[in-house]
Structure formats: C-alpha cells, structure tokens
Amino acid sequence: MSLGRCRKLLALVVVTAAASTAQVVDLTGTWVLNVEKSRWGKLRPPLTITVTIDHQEPNLAYSGRLISAEGEEAREFEFRGAIDGREHPLVRSFAQGTIVLKRVDARTLESEFKSNDGLWTEFARTSVSGDGRLMRRSVRREGPSGRLEWTEVYERR
C-alpha cells in the first residue's frame, strides 16, 4: 500500500473514531415551552407545555402537560421507549399508534409517528443547542385536516 493511501486510511479511521465517540447530549430535565420563540404556522399556540425527560441513552422516557390557549383544556402525555430505530407504542390525544426514534447525531433526534388507523402521520426533528439550554422541535403532521407544520422551542429549567 502506498504512503498516500495509508495516510488517507489513517485519516478516515481517526475521523470515524471521533464521530463515534461524540458525546450524546443528555435530555434529562424539565423543559418549558417558550411560546414567543416558537413558530405555529396555522396552529393556535398553546398557553404552555412542560415536558419532563429521563434520558439514559438509548432509553428515553418523557411525560408532560399541555395547557390550551384558552387555559381550559389540559392534556397529559407520556412515552417510554428507546432511541433505537424500532417501533414503540404511543398513545396521543388524537390517535393511537407507533413511534420510531432515530439518532441523527449527538444533538439531534428524528421521530416518526403513525396512527394505527393510518389516518395520521407526524415527523419531528428535535435538536438541542450547543450549550444544552434550548431544545427545538420541528414538526410536520399530516391527517384528515391536511398538513400542518410548526416549530416548538423549549428552555431547560
């Protein structure tokens, strides 16, 4: 093997090793929606959303509470599963189905929800800022009422 090929191979090994050892961001904590920093598209913004996360890579458990804009309707939600590319059951306020969570990089996850009745799909890309204080969730939902897109911004408390 030529010296040039050896150097290229060594560089590839170093880059691959560095990427594989990148520290995965720990999502554990309480996250509160910043309504003003979020973009709502056609949706009416909620009054607040609070999410509590327990993250032990690859396991992820979260629970939360959404209070509607009117302040009258409170919805609670919960998930227990893993960031492993496999289907996990999920019950949502609008549908029951499965969700698949995949890691894109050390600070980014993608999720895809499909309802059991085939009427709803939701794709979300969740990323955490470099300082670990902000979490952004970009969502695209399709269903009987059409396509909706919005971005939620959360602050760690």
Image (cartoon, helix red, strand yellow):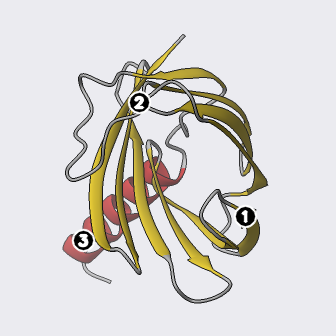
Q: Quadrant of residue 23?
A: top right
Residue 80, image x, y percentages: 80, 51
Does residue 144 lie above or below 131 as drawn?
A: below
Query: In screen coordinates, is 120 left or right of 116?
Result: left
Depth order, front residue of 70/139: 70
Q: Which residue extends farthest bottom?
A: 118
- The 10 Å Cα crowd at callout 1, few under 14, some 14 to 19, many 20 or more, is many
Of badges 2 and 3, the one in the foreground is 2
Question: At 35% across and 29% down in the image, what residue appears?
Answer: 129
Name the residue that disc number 2 marks.
69
> Residue at label 3?
3
Query: Circle 1 — which element?
Result: strand
Asked whether disc 2 touches disc 1, contact meaning CB atoms under 8 Å apart, the reply is: no
- Compare marks 2 and 1 and give the one earlier in the sequence: 2
Disc assigned to residue 90: 1
Of the residues under marks 1 and 3, which one precedes in the sequence?
3
- Asked which secondary structure carries label 3, the reply is helix
Residue 26 in view in this figure: no
Q: Position of residue 71 (x, y in %)?
A: 50, 24
Q: Is residue 130 left or right of residue 53?
A: left
On-image quarter of the N terminus: bottom left
How many labels, in total? 3
From mark 2 to mark 1, how far is it between C-alphas?
Answer: 24 Å
- Determine the image quadrant of residue 136: top left
Residue at image coords 39%, 42%: 127
Q: Are marks 2 and 3 in contact (CB under 8 Å)?
A: no
> Residue at coordinates 71% horizontally, 45% vertically from top-left?
57
**Mark 3: few/some/many CA within 10 Å (<14, 14-19, 20+):** few
Amino acid type for the residue under numbered disc 2: Ala
Q: Disc 1 versus disc 3: distance between alpha carbons?
A: 54 Å
Residue 22 percent location from the top left of the image: 49, 42
Q: Amino acid at mark 3?
A: Leu
